[in-house]
Amino acid sequence: MNNGIIRDLDLKQASVRFIYDVILFFAVMTLFLCLAPVVWVLFSGFKDIKEFTIGKNILPERFDLQRYIETWKRLRFVRYYQNSFISVVGSVFCAVIFNGLLGYVLSKIKPRGAKLIYGLVMWSMLIPATTSIVPLFININRIGLSGSFIPLWLSMGANAFYVIMFKNFFDVLPMSLVEAAKIDGSTDLQIFRDIAIPLSQPIIMVIIMFSINAAWSDFLLPYLVLNNTGLETVMVRLFQFRTATKATDVEILRAVTFVMVPPILLFLIFQKQITQVNLQSGIKG
């Protein structure tokens, strides 16, 4: 309480206490609405198809992990986890390096036409991603990158939202550091590598979290590029498992559990860093 906007002394006022209780109630209800589907999917995976379709209780009659193990073996998810891991690692690297470079150039170097480029970056956020998927897929095939992870990596390295986040963060960094490095003979690339990147660990952590979640949950582009190549990610494998096999609804829910567990664990581990940097990115000066 002492570190928040409401002090312990304020809560002694009836009006403040009422508003606080209302906010707390809506926060708890929001938390319940967010967790209810996840809990339902998890518990449903412990049921058999008869209990799932006829039973009325959300809790299973018994928690049998063998059912999850059997679905895991049938899916052969280890292989697709590896494919997703390769996709995520390359996407994170491109998201940090390429978007970070453009954000640094627009913030600190500011070449001629920087405002125009920044305006185009902002304007590109108004274009729905689905409208560009057809020309993107055509160009991927023309240059012979279909059937590889490279298009997935590069698409994550051209993200307008990440560029804006990097630029806003670099705007806060003192220009005196850049000027001092130039006096010492450092090039712009060396300054970006030796000064900007080390000082940008908070925003880099946020970009990493966002890009991991985006790369892990992306379906359309991996499906178009990697389908029937043996390099399918877990999201593509989940779609194949639903359409190409005689899987029951309960098995689909177990597969969904395997897909959603890694992002949830990642957020639980790094939620403090994400919320702190999101707050800092909105404060300048």
Image: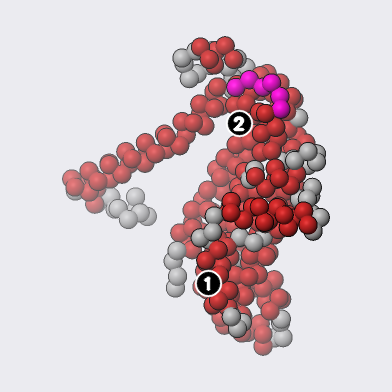
Report if residue 166 is visible in the image.
no
Q: Nearer the viewer, residue 66 or 2?
A: 66
Instruction: Please give the name of the residue rendered at 67% of the width and 88% of the height, measured from the top-left corner.
Output: 183
Task: Name the image quarter holding residue 184.
Answer: bottom right
The percent position of residue 76, horizontal first and vertical second, equals 76, 30
Residue 119's disc is 1
Residue 73 drawn above or below residue 33: above
Residue 179 drawn above or below residue 23: below
Q: Please state which amino acid type lies under the numbered disc 1.
A: Gly
The percent position of residue 212, horizontal first and vertical second, equals 63, 49
Q: At numbered mark 2, what does the secondary structure look like: helix, strand or loop?
A: helix
Work out how far the residue at label 2 is from the one at label 1, CA to CA, in angstroms. Answer: 41 Å
The percent position of residue 210, horizontal first and vertical second, equals 58, 52
Q: Please state which amino acid type lies under the numbered disc 2.
A: Thr
Q: Nearer the viewer, residue 227 or 262?
A: 227
Residue 257's disc is 2
Residue 267 drawn above or below residue 172: above
Instruction: Please give the name of the residue rendered at 56% of the width and 45% of the height, measured from the top-left corner.
Output: 267
- Stretch of the chain drawn in magenta: 244-249
Magenta-colored stretch includes residue 245: yes
Which callout, 2 or 1, points to the residue nearer the camera?
1
Crowd rating for badge 2 (residues with CA inside 10 Å; few <14, some 14–19, many 20+): some
Magenta-colored stretch includes residue 25: no
Residue 188's disc is none
Q: At numbered mark 1, what does the secondary structure look like: helix, strand or loop?
A: helix
Q: Main secondary structure of the magenta part?
A: loop
